[in-house]
Image: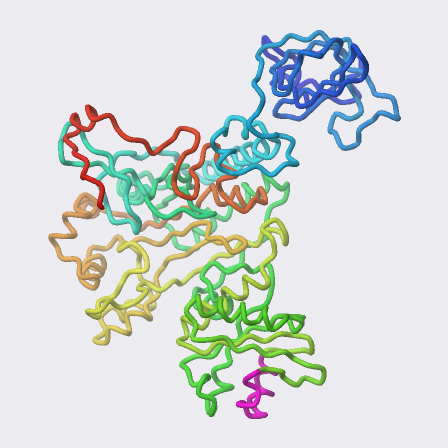
Amino acid sequence: MTVNLAARTAHRSDFCGELQANDEGREVVLCGWVNARREHSQHLAFVDLRDHTGVVQCVVDNAHDLRNEYVLRVTGVVTKRTVDTVNPNLGTGEIEIKECEVEVLSTAEPLPFQMDGRTDVDENLRLRHRYLDLRSERMQRNLRLRSRVNSAIRGAMEAQGFVEIETPFLIASTPEGARDFVVPSRHSPGQFYALPQSPQLFKQLCMVGGVDRYYQIARCLRDEDLRADRQFEFTQLDAEASFVSQDDVLAFVTEAVAAATEAVTGERPGEIPRMTWHDAMERYGSDKPDIRFGMELVELTEVFAGTGFNAFKAPAVKGLRVPGGAGKTRKQLDELTDKAKQWGAKGLVWMKVQDGGALNSPVAKFLSEQEQTGIAKVLDAEPGDLLLLVADERAKARHVLGLLRLELGRPPVNEGGFSFLWVVDFPLFEALDEHGSPIPAHHPFTMPHEDDMALLDTADPTDLLQVRSQAYDLTLNGWELGSGSVRIHRPDIQSRMFALLGIGEDEARRKFGFLLDAFTYGAPPHAGFAFGIDRLATLLAGEENIREVIAFPKTQTGADPLTGAPTEIDPAHLDELGLRLLPEKQ
């Protein structure tokens, strides 16, 4: 007998989807929605009753007035089906409920869309009636999967000595890399709070406060363009620890991710490999590489060191082998070339490897025999392969080929397992501005790599682009899950960083004064990390969009079809806040 005591309430005794053959003969009280009704005879019908655990068939007399999505309470006896009526596609397919007494708890109007899972429904319609969409098997599965992920993360962090602390939601605006959502203050007209893009500064203050190990499943908000892996509102595991190294943080987060994965799949991932940022960019053209498949980028610059072909006289030449890709038509190759140009390349060279190893390409006549042999050798080309080459600035060549690699080889999100990867040794600065000053790749509290400290005092600004940071990202199947870093806690290094970034003392005090003050009272060495729970849950669920694991998401345009948000504000409310709306631009 499979009695679930958690199901027992004043209204019911069991969940629909948990009844099995060994419950035969037991009287049960079930509550749920009418999933379907099928007439069996003039007075008898099969009513499929659904709750969040599944569906069970009820044999009901005089069910003519029952409609889909009516809410029922059914009292009946669990009965085994005859062998010829067993439904192997249903979890409860060996039994049905007979001798049913039915009470209608709530009626339902005809639905705005079918909920059978077999009909494609416009996403806006789904979101406008999200309360109906949430009843679907898919959304029930995804939201409960996400709940297991959250629970596993909490358990893993607490087992490692982390303390859950909630940080403020109304804060001062600080530079975080995206636009803040702001909230006007009624008590201080003309002044605003910002909603947190992350708890970054507060978790560092927790370290100064001696918390030692902090974590939070934090709600964060960023006013940025939306896409498949991004929403205005998102949830992240946020963590910080004192007296730790980068390796310690990676171990903490690995344990949390492994626990979450095991909670969903029943298996823990193996040891998560590490790759430097430089290797990721050279081999995959991305700092969040999808390592489920090969097709790595290959260095060809040396092959064309003395070339007479002007198109290959470039700072870098990178190549990509597409196994079996020689069957692509000229139209398909032209489309790939157009995409490469849209992504910023000057062009794309393609070569088909023929039987015997000869290269069929519009540019073959411009290449020496030695160059053609070198291309085939370095790329391990075989007959039937397609070779793609881009010659350009190094960053551009690897970026474009990296996108082509994904275009041609990336498997669906729910195929190939879960390939986690730590990417480490990110650059501290991403570029120089027009004045020759470095542009930070992270927030200004990221500790430089110990071996590169001397480069901070270089006379040549371009040397600063060689400085590595103690920053690290966690990726999964080509998605960036999150990032973190060892923080600067020494005033001398922090002052040097501000000076390099052109942040004067007054500006530093204005933006970060409360944190800098805290650091003067004994700041321990500390490091942290944050990763997106929405993204992790999405991939573990085999979905392509984080909206499918969020109960009430926004659309791609940031709208909420359910509530109509964003909406206008009552003029009286604006007056209270001391705000006036500008006329629309003509």
Give coordinates of residue 405: x percent, y percent: 54, 65
Left or right of residue 393: residue 545: right
Residue 376 is covered by the magenta coloring: yes
Regarding residue 212, the answer to whether it shows in the image is: yes
Q: Is residue 570 left or right of residue 34?
A: left
**Residue 407, located in which quarter of the rendered image?**
bottom right
Residue found 65% across the figure and 31% down from its top = 116
Q: Nearer the viewer, residue 35 or 488?
A: 35
Residue 184 versus residue 210: which sits nearer the camera?
Answer: 184
**161 in the magenta segment:** no
x 13%, y 35%: residue: 190
Residue 369 lies, in percent from the top left, at 59, 92
Residue 21 screen position, x and y as percent: 79, 21
Q: Is residue 323 something one can see in this rendering?
A: no
Q: Is residue 69 above or below residue 210?
A: above
The image quadrant that residue 240 belongs to is top left
On screen, residue 225 versus residue 435, left or right, reads right
For image coordinates 69% across by 78% down, the residue present is: 383
Which sits in the foreground, 213 or 97? Answer: 97
For the stretch drawn in magenta, the main secondary structure is helix
Span of residues in magenta: 362-378
Point out residue 374 in the picture as x, y percentages from the top left corner: 57, 86
